[in-house]
């Protein structure tokens, strides 16, 4: 087992009766037990736990919620920086210009407003060119353009997008160091004619914040997206220009458009950018938005030709002889901008990693499903062969142990179902300090071969060990107090013990209360888990868990590993791994069916799965030394342990990325492709579930709720697993929990009981 070392994950708190005192474990520890040292460590840990970890549940919830919120914010920020969130690609068509002043339409490319809101347009002087570049900075093309400008010692004006500044702050600093002018081109490049004043303000403020963080500057120079010459102003865009003027911005348009965004030949770009008859001009180029190799090539020749014609080059405000439009940002804005850039940098590092992780998880999910299907088919084929047999029939009587704590709703059905068994059995109901009369109900049934063992409340593991101590027979079946057996269940369950190497057998647990939606979801989960997962693990000889609802053991195997342990909340997983490590074979008997009452509410389901997930992690940590052991222990450690860790912890923990990226893609990128990819994964899950239902002879109509299960139920399981991981990471204690039962899983019709002699 654990080599005498106490696992670092905390032991569960067991519910005790107020008057109960701690009692010694009824089973002596064997050579693999904890011993005195382990008990001392356990007592010391338990003494200090309550004082230091009372706030753990709230801390776990906060950490779990913070993780999910951080992931969502990261994806939203990345989408915003790539114009996928809040993007508005509409471009307004031409409108009349009845309300645009004539002096604005016929003036130069620079527009300002006085205090009274009256517009004035400004011309670029003759034989002067103001080179302007829109949509950058781009990590590939902007540096090349900066090199051309440096080689020719020419200044320019760059109208930058805030989302590009946040992603490439270093290029903005290079522009400033080279003496270039920087203007605002909004944050996400929307047509402002369609936007409200609040949206316009956000576009401006966020870009200014990005500039402050990148280079410690702000700019009052602005160019609207999709703008061209001043004469193109119309009644739709004019109100925006007036609002910008009221905000103190200088609006820059263009006299000449190189039309490089259409990627024409280099010579055509040069011709398009050349002013007529020696006039001055603000010339429009682009340093981002696609392949700009022709722009770079054209710019080099263009500058040489224009200089040869006697043209000079200046920034927009420099050409007009005006004061600089760029000024230092205040300290608070600088730090706020840096925080934005740091967040963007984090996002740009995380998102590619998440994308790769998504690919790995997607492949892993499909590979796991395919592996389960193939191995389940192989397992079924091997079991269905005529020559397959476990050996001679097992006729020896069996002791059935039923640990019970406040099971008054279910216990009568459970015991009656056992009394109808076609295999000779004795029934031991271990009442673990119940306060609802559970033991009295069993005694009132007055059935033969039924004994009630009473003990003070000490937990399920102690109850099972008490039952093992009192059992008369060498084959022991364990079940829960909310479960019913079919008449032939015990006989089928003990068949594999004909093989001397089999130490334990896992049965086929089925959901009995499946009429409701939550029960139907769990029904699908159980069928897939038992008929695919357990068949796979059985074939690989690394069964991780014998379900508490239905499992059988050899007494000798239980003695060898020290009985049931209370070290974890998943005593069934703990004992199963311990048996593997001791060299015993653990198998799955699909024909041994038990009907259990699954949680009927989301709250009960959460508590159950939370305990299961956390207990599994405890058991894996406890048996971590199997990874380096030799023999059977090492085989499980290097085969079973990685499979369980990856498929039951890591992959489910990362699986929400599939749904998050699907939602992200459906809303912000390509809804058709995103939903098709998700639907393909859903179809694969449906096919796997259908095959599992076929193996178990279940009706396919239950699969009608599978899509809703994938959308709603699976998300709940994600959060439960995340909560469990946070609990494990914080080392918090988790008490034993009792689910509320209804007793709606009834005893099946059975023949008369067979007495044990």
Image (tube, rainbow, N blue to C red):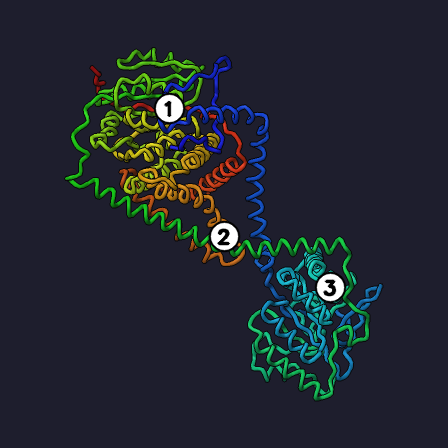
512 and 730: which one is in front? 730
- Residue neighbourhood size for the residue with mark 2, other residues' Cα within 10 Å, grouped as few (<14), some (14–19), many (≥20): some
Depth check, mark 1 against mark 3: the one in front is 1
- Give the quarter of the figure containing the N terminus: top left
Check contact, mark 1 vs mark 2: CB within 8 A. Answer: no
On residue 661, the disc is 2
In the shown orientation, is residue 669 left or right of residue 488? right
Where is 371 relative to 205, above or below? above
The residue that label 3 is drawn on is 239
Instruction: Return the disc, 1 or 2, that comes first in the chain's sequence.
Output: 1
Quarter-of-image position of residue 522: top left
**Badge 3 element:** helix
The residue lying at 28 percent from left, 13 percent from top is 447
The residue lying at 48 percent from left, 24 percent from top is 40
Residue 611's x, y, as percent?
Answer: 45, 31
Check contact, mark 3 vs mark 2: CB within 8 A. Answer: no
In the shown orientation, is residue 39 left or right of residue 596? right
- Residue neighbourhood size for the residue with mark 3, other residues' Cα within 10 Å, grouped as few (<14), some (14–19), many (≥20): some
441 and 70: which one is in front? 70
Instruction: Return the disc, 1 or 3, that comes first in the chain's sequence.
Output: 1
Could you tell me how far apart the alpha carbons at marks 3 and 2 are, in whole angstroms? 39 Å
Depth check, mark 3 against mark 2: the one in front is 2
Residue 661's x, y, as percent?
Answer: 49, 52
Residue 245 visible in the snapshot = no
The residue that label 1 is drawn on is 29
**Badge 2 element:** helix
The residue lying at 48 percent from left, 56 percent from top is 671
Where is 487 relative to 581, above or below? above
The residue lying at 48 percent from left, 18 percent from top is 16
Instruction: Return the disc, 3 or 2, that comes first in the chain's sequence.
Output: 3
262 and 439: which one is in front? 439
């Amino acid at each position: 087992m654990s080599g005498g070392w106490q696992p670092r994950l905390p032991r569960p708190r067991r519910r005790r009766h107020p008057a109960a005192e701690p009692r010694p474990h009824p089973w002596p520890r064997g050579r693999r037990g904890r011993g005195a040292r382990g008990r001392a460590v356990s007592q010391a840990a338990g003494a200090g736990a309550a004082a230091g970890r009372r706030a753990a549940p709230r801390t776990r919830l906060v950490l779990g919620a913070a993780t999910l919120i951080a992931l969502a914010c990261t994806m939203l920020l990345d989408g915003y920086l790539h114009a996928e969130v809040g993007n508005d690609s509409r471009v307004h068509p031409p409108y009349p210009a009845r309300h645009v002043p004539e002096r604005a339409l016929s003036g130069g490319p620079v527009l300002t407003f006085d205090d009274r809101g009256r517009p004035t347009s400004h011309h670029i002087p003759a034989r002067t060119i103001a080179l302007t570049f829109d949509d950058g900075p781009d990590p590939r093309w902007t540096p090349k353009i900066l090199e051309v400008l440096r080689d020719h010692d020419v200044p320019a004006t760059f109208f930058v997008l805030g989302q590009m500044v946040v992603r490439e702050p270093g290029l903005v600093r290079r522009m400033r160091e080279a003496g270039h002018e920087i203007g605002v081109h909004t944050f996400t490049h929307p047509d402002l004619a369609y936007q409200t004043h609040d949206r316009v303000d956000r576009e401006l403020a966020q870009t200014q914040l990005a500039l402050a963080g990148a280079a410690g500057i702000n700019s009052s120079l602005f160019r609207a997206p999709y703008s061209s010459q001043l004469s193109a102003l119309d009644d739709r865009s004019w109100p925006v220009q007036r609002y910008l003027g009221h905000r103190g911005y200088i609006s820059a348009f263009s006299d000449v458009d190189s039309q490089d965004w259409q990627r024409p030949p280099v010579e055509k770009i040069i011709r398009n950018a050349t002013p007529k008859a020696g006039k001055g001009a603000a010339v429009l180029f682009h340093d981002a938005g696609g392949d700009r190799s022709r722009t770079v090539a054209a710019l080099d020749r263009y500058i040489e030709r224009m200089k040869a014609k006697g043209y000079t080059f200046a920034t927009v405000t420099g050409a007009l002889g005006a004061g600089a439009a760029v000024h230092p940002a205040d300290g608070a804005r600088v730090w706020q901008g840096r925080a934005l850039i740091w967040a963007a940098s984090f996002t740009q590092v995380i998102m590619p990693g998440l994308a790769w992780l998504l690919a790995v998880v997607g492949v892993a999910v499909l590979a796991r499903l395919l592996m389960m299907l193939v191995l389940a088919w192989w397992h079924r084929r091997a079991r269905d062969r005529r020559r397959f047999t476990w050996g001679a029939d097992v006729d020896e009587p069996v002791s059935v142990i039923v640990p019970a704590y406040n099971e008054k709703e279910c216990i009568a059905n459970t015991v009656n179902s056992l009394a109808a068994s076609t295999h000779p059995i004795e029934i031991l109901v271990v009442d673990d300090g119940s306060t609802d009369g559970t033991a009295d109900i069993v005694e009132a049934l007055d059935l033969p071969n039924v004994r009630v063992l009473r003990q003070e409340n000490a937990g399920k593991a102690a109850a099972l060990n008490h039952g093992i101590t009192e059992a008369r027979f060498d084959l022991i079946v364990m079940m829960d107090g909310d479960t019913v057996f079919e008449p032939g269940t015990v006989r089928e369950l003990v068949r594999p013990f004909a093989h001397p190497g089999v130490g334990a057998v896992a049965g086929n647990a089925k959901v009995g209360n499946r009429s409701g939606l939550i029960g139907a979801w769990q029904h699908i989960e159980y069928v897939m888990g038992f008929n695919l997962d357990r068949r796979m693990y059985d074939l690989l000889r690394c069964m991780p868990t014998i379900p508490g609802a239905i499992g059988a053991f050899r007494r000798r195997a239980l003695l060898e590993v020290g009985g049931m342990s209370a070290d974890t909340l998943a005593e069934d997983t703990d004992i199963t791994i311990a048996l593997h490590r001791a060299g015993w074979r653990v198998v799955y008997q699909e024909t041994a069916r038990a009907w259990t009452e699954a949680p009927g509410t989301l709250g009960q389901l959460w508590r159950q799965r939370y305990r299961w997930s956390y207990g599994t992690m405890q058991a894996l940590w406890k048996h971590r030394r199997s990874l380096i052991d030799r023999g059977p222990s090492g085989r499980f450690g290097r085969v079973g342990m990685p499979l369980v860790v990856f498929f039951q912890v890591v992959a489910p923990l990362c699986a929400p990325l599939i749904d998050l990226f699907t939602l992200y893609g459906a809303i912000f990128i390509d809804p058709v492709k995103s939903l098709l990819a998700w639907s393909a994964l859903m179809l694969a899950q449906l096919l796997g579930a259908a095959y599992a239902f076929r193996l178990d002879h279940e009706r396919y109509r239950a699969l009608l709720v599978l899509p809703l299960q994938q959308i709603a139920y699976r998300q709940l399981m994600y959060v439960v697993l995340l909560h469990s991981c946070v609990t494990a990471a914080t080392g918090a204690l988790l008490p034993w929990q009792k689910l509320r039962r209804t007793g709606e899983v009834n005893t099946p019709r059975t023949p008369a009981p067979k007495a044990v002699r």
